[in-house]
Each structure stands twice: as C-alpha cells, then as structure tokens.
Amino acid sequence: MENKILIEEILKLKEEKNAIILAHNYQPKEIQEVADFLGDSLELCIKASEIEDKDIVVFCGVDFMAETAYILNPNKKILIPDVEAECPMAHMLNAEQIKEAKKQYPKAPVVLYVNSLAEAKAESDILCTSGNALKIVESLDSDTILFGPDTNLGRYVEKQTDKKIIPIPGDGHCYVHKKYEVKDIDNAKKTHPNADVIVHPECDIEVQNAADYVLSTGGMLNHIKNSEKDEFIIGTEIDFMTRVENETSGKKLYPLLSDAICETMKLHTLKNLKNALQNEEHIVKVPEDIREKSFNAVNKMIQASK
Ligand code: 13P
Ligand code: SF4
C-alpha cells in the first residue's frame, strides 16, 4: 500500500516537473517498475543523448552514469536519489594515473570504460561500454591501446583482437563480478545441463572462458529473448533477473550466484526517488572544463556505436 502511494506521488511529480526517470538494469524491482527507460550502460548513454523535451532527468544508477547524463545534457537538471550510489570500480582510476600511463605510451590511444570518473574521461580519447568495447578498440588506428579501469573487460577485448591492450591500472575490477568462480559454472551446469551459461565481461577471464556466452546486460536480454533455448544460467548482478523475468515468458532463469549484489545500486528507493523529484535533489554536475573534454570521448563512442 505504501509503495502504491509513493508510486502515485512519483508519477504526479514527474508530470508536474517535466521529468524523465532513467534506470539501470541492476535497479531494484520497484524502481524498474516506475522508470520510463531501463537499459544497460550503452543504451542509457544513447537515451541520455537523445532527451530533448524534458527539464529534469532522474538517474537511478551509479554516479558515473548520472555524470555521463550531465556531460551530454549540461542544460538539464540531472538528479540522483542517493548521492552515495558510487561505482567502486570507477574510483580505481584517476586522471593522474592516466597522464602517467600516457607518458609511458605516448602514441597509444586511451579507451576508457564508461564506468570511470569524469576527470578520467576527460583524459581519454574515446569511451566504451561492455556492449561495444571490442568495436571501439577495433575502430582505432593503433596497435597498442591503453584500456581501463576494468582489467577483465580489457582481457575480454584482448582475446578477440590482434591489438595489445595495456591495462590502467593493473588491477581495476568490479567486486560484484569478481565473486564468480569456474566451480560455480561447473555446479550450475550439473544442476541445469540444458541451460546456456551467460556471464558479463566484468567476470574473471577463466569464468568468461568457462561460459557459453559473454555479454553486456543488454546483450544478455537480447540473447535470451531471441534464443530458441528456454533455460539460462545468468552470471551478473541479481536484479538483472527481474528485468528479464518481466520481459520474457516461458524462459527459465537461474542465477549463477544469488549473492551477486551491487550494494550501491540498491541505495535508490521509491522514497528517495520521490524526494529527489519533490526537492530537486541531489544535483549532479561536473566542472565545465572536465565536461567539455569528456564530452568528446562520450560523443565519439555514441557516434561509433550507431
Ligand atoms: P552493462 O549494463 O553495460 O552491461 O554494465 C554493467 C555494469 O556493471 C554497469 O556498471
Ligand atoms: Fe560498479 Fe560493479 Fe556495481 Fe557495475 S556492478 S556499478 S561495475 S560495482
């Protein structure tokens, strides 16, 4: 009942304030239900680049996602319901570390995963997401690429390209996807021998190698929708299952681990989403010089992905 009232208030405020709610696939069920648009990181970037008729964007995701929406829309109010919703991986690489790496490899372009700080994006040549990393790396006219902060996504790309991938830093990772081990896949396959095993490229390379498919969350959803198979073991954050369950019927989904939870993604609730709209808080911005520099890298990625 309380949720029903909160949802009504959110929908009313959204109308009054001419706002749109964007949410990542890892958001809790109740946020997924109230969002105007749900997506993976690439889909959210593209959507954010296309918003013309709204004054406010409420971003239910982690900090770098809301910052990217601001980088693309400096004239709109970008709000995040809980300011502590940070991605720890993004905070593993700062601008100084990139400058140091560039000194060592002056000719190598810097490809940054969108899960990065705005100050780091400003030092990069082009961004990528897990959905387009290989395409972006292949589009560059250089044999050596500086790539960060996710070493596992870097290895995923390296496996499929002749280019040399230099990770920056050497140990950037996602603590959620690090939880998966090869033995989890072996066990799940024993229990569900007919299921496809799909994991995210943020998983360790051994886990990627043991899976049937390695895909972004958007790629996973498309695969499941279009596959003739009807059983899937899913190796990514647990609430992605909510999205798939809502959009597919007759498919059996099994989590590879049930405790793969991105804690900061869960900080957004109906209550603080309502407060965000009501009080127009918490405003997400980045300094203008950083925004301008990082816009080029974000925009190049979007153009290369279309
Ligand atoms: P995608 O949704 O782009 O697959 O990325 C997952 C992720 O961890 C976002 O932080
Ligand atoms: Fe960051 Fe991992 Fe959470 Fe994605 S799942 S937002 S990479 S901590």
Image (cartoon, helix red, strand yellow):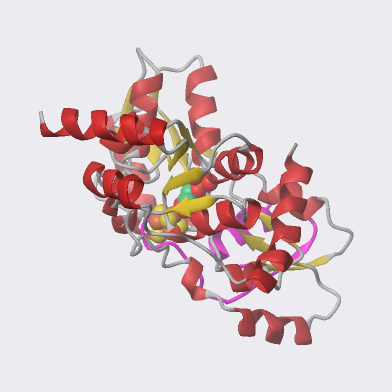
- Residue 267 position by quadrant: bottom left
Residue 222 in sight: yes
Q: Is 239 located above or below residue 64 in the figure?
A: above
Indicate the quadrant containing the C terminus: top left, top right, bottom left or bottom right. Answer: top right
- Residue 176 position by quadrant: bottom left
The one nearer the camera, 160 or 292, is 292
Residue at 40% x, 45% y: name it. 236
Rendered location of residue 197, percent (x, y): 43, 35
Residue at 77% x, 87% y: name it. 103
Rendered location of residue 210, percent (x, y): 48, 46
Q: Is 165 located above or below residue 243 in the figure?
A: below
Rendered location of residue 4, percent (x, y): 18, 28
Please indicate whether residue 228 sits to the left or right of residue 6 in the image: right
Q: Which residues are magenta?
A: 148-176
Residue 156: within the magenta? yes
Task: Kindly give the residue lying farthest to the right in the view shown.
Answer: 141
Task: Kindly give the residue lying farthest to the left in the view shown.
Answer: 1
